[in-house]
Image (cartoon, helix red, strand yellow):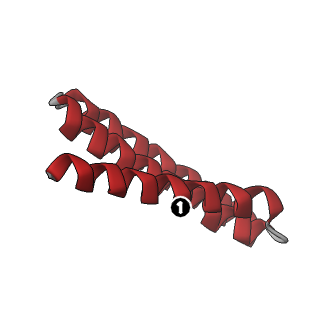
């Protein structure tokens, strides 16, 4: 039963990921693209977490933490660039 719920969650996450990719490529402004990139990152982090649970490997959680930190720094750099501080 839990496998089916995880499968449904993965399908919903993949649909959300596709929506973020669409907004990233078709976004009218740079801010829309930054928000879409952040959304893609969050969805990817959750998918990595689900994969870690399914495979039983804790190393994927470490990968997700590093990926989240790098994504956060990337969004901060782009936000500084948009403000003109860089």
Q: Which residue lies at the image location 14% right of the left edge and 52% below the top edge?
A: 1
User: How many tags in the picture?
Assistant: 1
Percent coordinates x, y for residue 65 in the rendering = 31, 43
Q: Does residue 20 appear left or right of residue 68 in this picture?
A: right
Q: Which residue lies at the image location 24% right of the left edge and 56% below the top edge?
A: 5
Percent coordinates x, y for residue 50 in the rendering = 28, 45
In-front residue for pair 28/14: 14
Percent coordinates x, y for residue 35 in the rendering = 62, 67
Q: Which residue lies at the image location 30% right of the left edge and 37% below the top edge?
A: 51
List the residue tagged with mark 1: 16
Q: Does residue 18 appear left or right of residue 32 in this picture?
A: left
Percent coordinates x, y for residue 86 in the rendering = 72, 57
Is residue 46 something that shows in the picture? yes
Q: Does residue 67 appear left or right of residue 16 in this picture?
A: left
In-front residue for pair 13/48: 13
Q: Is residue 32 above or below residue 58?
A: below
Q: Which residue lies at the image location 44% right of the left edge and 60% below the top edge?
A: 12
């Amino acid at each position: 039963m839990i496998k089916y719920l995880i499968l449904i969650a993965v399908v919903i996450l993949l649909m959300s990921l596709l929506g973020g990719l669409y907004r990233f490529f078709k976004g009218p402004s740079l801010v829309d693209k930054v928000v879409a990139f952040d959304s893609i990152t969050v969805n990817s982090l959750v998918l990595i977490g689900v994969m870690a649970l399914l495979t039983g490997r804790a190393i994927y959680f470490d990968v997700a933490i590093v990926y989240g930190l790098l994504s956060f720094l990337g969004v901060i750099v782009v936000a500084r660039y948009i403000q003109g501080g860089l």
